[in-house]
Image (tube, rainbow, N blue to C red):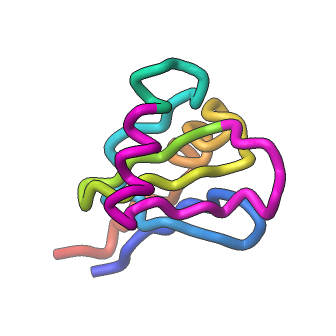
Amino acid sequence: MTQHMINVGFGNSVVAGRVLLVVNPKSSPVKKLKDEAKAQKKLIDVTEGRKTRSIIILDTNHVILSAIQPETVTQRFSASPIDDKEN
């Protein structure tokens, strides 16, 4: 079975099936979630020092900070190929 990867910026990818949410980082509940992930050592920053534009939440409770707009990340999901070769 092939795992589809989604580019989340600067050559970094995440397994598409693991993503639960792609959200805007500006709301206070999302900021709290980010702080909790940092305290639990589950925060992954792939912004390369740029402004965080989206936060990606995985089913493993890891939180990924990305410099890519949430709309762009979401569009990459719809552009992801479907594996028709599975039996």
Q: In the picture provided, is 36 more to the left or to the right than 45?
A: left
| Residue 15 is a magenta residue | no
Q: Quadrant of the C terminus?
A: bottom left
Q: Quadrant of the N terminus?
A: bottom left
Q: In the picture provided, is 46 more to the left or to the right than 29?
A: right
Residue 28 vs 81, above or below: the answer is above
Residue at 64 percent of width and 30 percent of height: 71
55 vs 37, nearest the viewer = 37
10 vs 62, nearest the viewer = 62
Query: Residue 9: where, in percent of width, then height?
Result: 72, 59
The total number of labels drawn is: 0
* Stretch of the chain drawn in magenta: 32-53
Query: Residue 37: where, in percent of width, then height?
Result: 38, 52
Residue at 57 percent of width and 68 percent of height: 13
Query: Residue 22: where, in percent of width, then height?
Result: 48, 37
* Displayed quadrant of residue 82: bottom left
22 vs 63, nearest the viewer = 63
Q: In the picture provided, is 26 more to the left or to the right than 10?
A: left
Residue at 48 percent of width and 20 percent of height: 28
Residue at 79 percent of width and 63 percent of height: 48
| Residue 51 is a magenta residue | yes
